[in-house]
Image: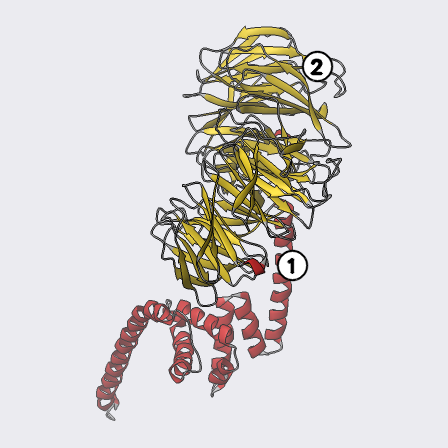
Amino acid sequence: MNGSSLKESYELESQYGPFFTGGNIEWSSDGQYFFCQNGGTVHVLSLATGHVESILGETSTDQDEDTVNSFALDPSDEDVITHHKSGLFKLWNWKEVKLKKMWKAIHNGPVSKVAFSRNSQTMASGGSDSSVRLWDLVHQACTHNLKGAQGVVSVLAFHPRPDKELIFAAGDDTKIYGWNSITGQQKIVLSGHFSKITSLLFHDDGIHLVSSGRDKVLILWDISQGSIVRTVPVYEGVEGSFLLPTNSTKLITSYQSDGIYVAAAGEKGVVKVWEMRSGNKVYEQENSLVASAKEVGGLSITQLLYNHVTNSFAVVSTEHNIIIHQLDTFECKKQLVGYSDEILDVVYFGTKDTHLAVATNSSDIKLYELTTMNCQLLCGHTDFILSLATTPANFNLLLSSAKDNSVRLWLMDPETFQVSCVAHAVRHTASVGSVSLSHTAVKFFTSVSQDLCLKIWDLPEKISSNETENTLTVRCTELAHQKDINAVAVSPNDKLVATGSQDKTAKLWTAESLQLVGVLRGHRRGVWCVRFSPIDQVLLTTSADCNIKLWSLTDLSCLKTLEGHESSVLRAEFLSRGMQLVTAGADGLLKLWSVKTSECVATLEHHENRVWALAVCRNETHIISGGSDSILGKWRDITEEKKAAAAAEAERLALEEQKLSNLLKADQLLAALKLALKLERPLQVLKIIDSVIRKGGDGLRETIHQLKQTQKESLLRCAVTWNTNSRNAQSAQLVINVLLDEISSGELKVPGLAASLEAMIPYTERHFKRLTQLMQDLHFISYTVTCMQPHNKISPT
């Protein structure tokens, strides 16, 4: 679509929101879906599209929401069992999002773990009441209450070999208990850990078990003897682990045929592979994308999941990121962001707007590939990122600023789409709140900070990812405002720089030397955003006073003030070559404005809270919005579609009207009546009914009898409308009489009949009184005429 054409409407095409906010994650056996705990629900995420396919549980935000405490996916990938705040177990067919069964749990308190048996006929539940219960899923009956474990159950698993008939669990007492899953009799107690046990792994030989814990050890057990084979110190608290199949990775050079290889990860954020019989570390991940815990004993990686079909594993981090690696090479295949917290800024990135760079309450930039929503984390900043910027001079350049007082320049390889940091700038003494790049050429950028300074930085002539990271130098620095500076923008010709501040003013500066050009005063509260028009000599400012102002760059006068938002206007962008605006407010609303008329053309509603971020693609067919509700909304321009649909509808109506006219001329009243009812033309329907009535006989009854149910309902609504006018009352009453006969005989059933009749009765009573009065007047005239007749005879003279 031509970017200069005026937009009239946008619709929400898709949204990308949180799908994992902490808790458990399950991976389908075919490797296509993740089942993620998101607040009080379970979200089913498709790895192919990166979007949520279905949601299990209640999505209400009420306090009485029946939230999910724990869940498990059955081995056949057919069903999901969830335990809820209400104490209920719910069995779901997740593909149809259908609740199959529901029953009451007998646990005293929440259920922390649930697990399926290999045949999916039995379920185990471990609660905070120190009990493990076995359930017959066919009859939803508790068959055994397994005693022994103390405190909250942290791990629960059936032995994968059916001939073993064992179920294992561990609680706060750091012991591993094993019971016979048929009789419920306790068979095994394994003591060796001194802190919380986080995982249990069963070897294919059916004899060996590997356990991990926060006591910084892995333990290899002989189940048949109930003894420790080897304790392997790993020097970090382990949160997740999995057994490696034989020869599943090329990175272990010397495989031992009888070796037991375990991949484990925890507070250091790195996956390590251990051979349990020898206790040796045989491999340590070199390409980890997860930062280590900030304090000793903290969390970094919370889960490790392995999928045998794809021979890949997933790393789940405390920042709610899911990183999928190929096991044979440890190469990163895909990154998914489960929860972004507040979205602070967003920009299109790449030569063809293929990617979306997002700044959130995180030190990493989240770079999404728009078609699959695969995410690449750009690491470099050490505190929350506040602002992002790109330039039309080079769409593969990205500028970012953060609370760590620094600015970083990133370059994307157009072939591989890999992004690397090529330069950084550290001269501010406080958080850098906004940045902007030059437009005509990659020569400089500007930055503003809470230190109240505006800085201009020179960029090198050649920027390449092959070079070492450059340290940038400042060209000019100015103490720009008296309060925090919220925004900065460079003019399209790179001659001017605009800043907006909490001191209620916007200022214009020369880009060459930062000389003050002028101060724009008029807002009653802080200025949140400044933007130059792409065509006209106009500057746009938005403010916490709910207003949007357009300023002339020639005389610095206020040209227009746009009012319509009921809360702070946080962001704005020009559209249609400067003829329109799109703005975002603290109330979650987006508004589309016409600059010429100063009117709001459309209001887009989807976000639940502040919208901090707006990005418009180059051809203006899509707008991306993001806010404090952690949702990225993708809006599509449907102006042309609406115009085409309206034109098609007008053409269709014209053809139908012509057809109706032809039917009336041909005196085909029944067909004409049906068409008039379809077109919802009450006046035309009335004329046709009058024509039928004039023909006399039972024509009206026969005509109505040939109508369909929906057509009779439409006719009744028309009759109720006619009945409000005394001139049409006779036709209305005749039609209503016929329809009431059919209703009383049961041939016609009209939804909302009572309301229709209730609206009709007062007018009917009024018509009845009027006709009664007319009859009385008629009888009086007849009486008068009769009395006058004897006196009409004139005597002959």
- Of the numbered discs 2 and 1, the one sitting upstream in the chain is 2
Q: Residue at x 75, y 38 (%)?
A: 250
On screen, residue 330 above or below 456: below
Tell me how many marks there are: 2
Q: Amino acid at mark 2?
A: Lys
Distance from disc 2 to disc 1, alpha carbons, whole Å, reads: 55 Å
Identify the residue under disc 1: 651
Q: Is residue 267 left or right of residue 495?
A: left
Circle 2: is it few (<14), some (14-19), or many (20+) Cα within 10 Å?
Answer: some
Q: Amino acid at mark 1?
A: Glu
Identify the residue under disc 2: 443
Q: Depth check: give the residue in front, 304 or 738.
A: 304
Task: Verify CB contact (< 8 Å) between mark 2 and mark 1.
Answer: no
Q: Is residue 491 visible?
A: no
Circle 1: is it few (<14), some (14-19), or many (20+) Cα within 10 Å?
Answer: few
Across and down, in percent, residue 794 comes to 25, 90
Q: Residue at x 52, y 41 (%)?
A: 18
Q: Nearer the viewer, mark 2 or mark 1?
A: 2
Q: Depth check: give the residue in front, 256 or 728.
A: 256
On screen, residue 428 above or below 207: above
Q: Hey, which quadrant is residue 674 in on the image?
A: bottom right
Across and down, in percent, residue 442 comes to 71, 18
On screen, residue 455 above or below 626: above
Furthest toward the bottom, the residue is 796
Q: Quadrant of the N terminus?
A: top right
Across and down, in percent, residue 122 comes to 49, 61
Q: Quadrant of the C terminus?
A: bottom left
Q: Is residue 255 visible?
A: yes
